[in-house]
Image: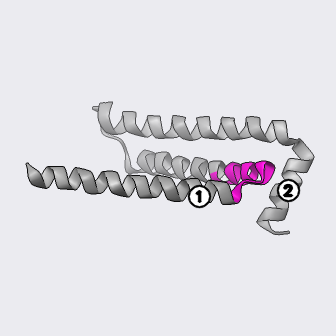
């Protein structure tokens, strides 16, 4: 079974509403993992063991994978792959413009 087939089966098995809720849960878990990492980097004065640091990073990777899977299911549920890709392209172009403007402003200083 392909990944896409598995995602379709998940949607059909659990339902659209449950998968939307699951998406929100996974987004929240990624947000929490990222916040924990920021807190460790910026506010923890105690030495963090490399093992604990690797666990934290690995948890971020795991949560990112969960979010990507759920976002793929959202694209299936909303039948919006093309629209999302168009928006991504617009957002990336806007980001590129902002970066260029910031660099130009910095060089003008």
Q: Which residues are magenta?
A: 68-81
Check the image and report above or below for 51 versus 16: below
Dot 2, crowdedness within 10 Å: few (<14), some or many (≥20)?
A: some
Q: Kindly indicate the quadrant of the structure image that contains residue 36.
A: top left
What residue is drawn where x is 88% and y is 55%? 9
- Mark before the other along the chain sequence, 2 or 1: 2
Check the image and report above or below for 43 versus 1: above
Residue at which label 1 appears? 86
The residue most toward the left is 109
Say if residue 46 shows up in the picture: no
What residue is drawn where x is 85% and y is 51%? 10
Looking at the picture, tell me which residue is in the foreground, 2 or 58.
2
Q: Left or right: 52 with respect to 46?
A: right
Nearest-to-viewer mark from 2 and 1: 1
Residue 11 x %, y % = 85, 49
Residue 107 x %, y % = 12, 55
Looking at the picture, tell me which residue is in the foreground, 39 or 12.
12
Query: How far apart, in angstroms, are the residues tagged by discs 2 and 1?
Result: 23 Å
Dot 1, crowdedness within 10 Å: few (<14), some or many (≥20)?
A: few
What residue is drawn where x is 17% and y is 50%? 105
Q: How would you classify the magenta stretch by its main secondary structure?
A: helix
SS assignment at label 1: helix
Determine which of the numbered discs, if any, sits on residue 8 in the image: 2
Please tell me whether residue 78 belongs to the stretch shown in magenta. yes
């Amino acid at each position: 079974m392909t990944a896409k087939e598995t995602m379709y089966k998940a949607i059909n098995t659990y339902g659209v509403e449950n998968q939307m809720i699951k998406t929100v849960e996974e987004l929240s878990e990624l947000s929490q993992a990222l916040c924990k990492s920021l807190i460790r980097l910026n506010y923890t004065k105690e030495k963090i063991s490399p093992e604990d640091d690797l666990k934290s990073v690995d948890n971020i990777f795991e949560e990112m994978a969960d979010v990507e899977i759920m976002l793929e299911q959202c694209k299936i549920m909303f039948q919006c792959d093309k629209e999302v890709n168009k928006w991504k392209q617009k957002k990336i172009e806007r980001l590129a413009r902002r970066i260029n403007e910031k660099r130009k402003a910095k060089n003008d200083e």
